[in-house]
């Protein structure tokens, strides 16, 4: 959250990507910071997945990530 906020303060469009395991923690951190970043959540865990499985997760999230980047880029 801190990195996303820092990037956006520099004018860099940013979207976080994390696993579903961190959804509650991300919401709590966002609330604590008073900041509502764009975050895309993917299936958990990722550490023991093969390269092909990771690629499939990325491919499955790509459209949402791109849409979030576009939306963030249009914000005033």
Image (tube, rainbow, N blue to C red):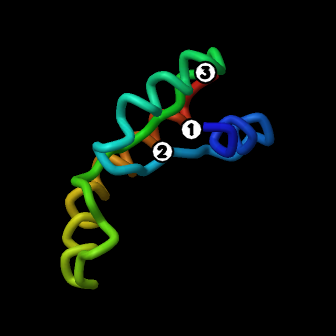
Q: CA distance from mark 1 to mark 3?
A: 16 Å
Q: Which residue is mark 3?
A: 35
Q: Residue at x 55, y 27 (%)?
A: 29
25, above or below 11, in the image: above
**Residue 22 place in picture, x, y as percent:** 38, 41
Q: Position of residue 28 (x, y in %)?
A: 49, 22
Which residue is label 1 attached to?
Answer: 73
Q: CA distance from mark 2 to mark 3?
A: 16 Å
Considering the numbered disc 1 on the image, is that residue within a helix, a strand or a loop?
helix
Residue placed under numbered mark 2 in the picture: 69
Most foreground residue, 11 or 18 = 18
Q: Residues within 10 Å of mark 2 (few under 14, many from 20)?
A: some
Direction from residue 73 to residue 20 in the image, left or right: left
Question: Left of 72 or right of it: where is 62?
Answer: left
Q: Residue at x 58, y 45 (%)?
A: 14
Q: Residue at x 63, y 42 (%)?
A: 4
- Closest to the observer: 17 or 31? 31
Mark 1 or mark 3, which is nearer to you? 3
Q: Quadrant of residue 54?
A: bottom left
- Element on which disc 3 rests: loop
First of labels 2, 3 by sequence position: 3
Q: Secondary structure at mark 2?
A: helix
Q: Is residue 45 above or below residue 50?
A: above
């Amino acid at each position: 959250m801190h990195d996303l906020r820092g990037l956006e303060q520099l004018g860099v469009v940013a979207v976080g990507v994390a696993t579903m395991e961190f959804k509650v923690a991300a919401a709590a951190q966002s609330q604590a910071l008073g900041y509502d970043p764009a975050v895309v959540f993917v299936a958990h865990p990722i550490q023991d997945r093969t390269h092909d499985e990771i690629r499939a997760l990325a491919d499955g999230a790509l459209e949402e990530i791109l849409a979030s980047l576009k939306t963030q880029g249009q914000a005033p």
